[in-house]
Image: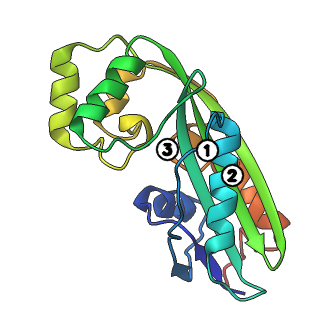
Amino acid sequence: MAFILGSGSPRRLDLLAQLGVQPDAVRPPDIDEDPLKAELPRPYCARIAREKVAAVQADNDDVVLCADTTVALGRRILGKPADAGEAAAFLHALSGRRHRVITAVAVRRGDKIWERAVVSQVQVKRLSDLEINAYLATNDWQGKAGGYAIQGPAGAFIPWISGSFTGIVGLPLAETAGLLQAAGYPLYKETS
């Protein structure tokens, strides 16, 4: 049985390492991640994780893990910003408000898929133009849902969360461990 991570995210690799899990292969799937018309954030996130895990090539006994993280401001999905201008718009929209971070995880072995979506609440302090511009200059916003990463410099903008910190980073560890065990992947192996 091989373990395949269907993600190019270095953060997900780091988080899996906290569980003592090293993928045998990393195969990020290439799928269309555009939301459907009027699609709400949580169903969107779950659908993308399912489509990713279905798109990864694997043998029948292999365990494949994929995830998707979505930032939701009300019913609005804030994806990965296309450029610094869109990142600035996202940060202005999030400034002084609470939003949800949804991470959906899908694990596949053979024809069976186990999945879970974890929703966390995040409060962003009121941001000044100086703070936003300084953050944009770090380029840490690139490739990040909502235009920020809690584990980077933007962590200074977040005084409060409720939910899963690792879920906000991109892979909720407690739930991921449960899904991997449900799929028969041995965690917490004894060392000889």
Name which residue type carries label 2. Answer: Arg
Q: Is residue 27 above or below residue 145?
A: below
Q: Position of residue 48 (x, y in %)?
A: 62, 54
Q: Which label number is shown at residue 36?
A: 1
Name which residue type carries label 3. Answer: Val
Whichever of callouts 1 and 3 sits on the residue coming sooner in the sequence is 1
Question: Mark 2 against mark 1, which lies toward the viewer?
Answer: 1
Question: Mark 1 against mark 3, which lies toward the viewer?
Answer: 1
Q: Name the residue under label 3.
A: 169
Q: Which label number is shown at residue 47?
A: 2
| Residue 52, picture quadrant | bottom right
Dot 1, how many residues are within 10 Å of its Cα: few (below 14), some (14-19), or many (20+)? few
Whichever of callouts 3 and 2 sits on the residue coming sooner in the sequence is 2
Residue at figure coordinates x 22%, y 37% from the top left:
84
Can I make out residue 182 in this image? yes
CB under 8 Å between callouts 1 and 3? no
In whole angstroms, how far apart are the C-alphas of marks 3 and 2? 19 Å
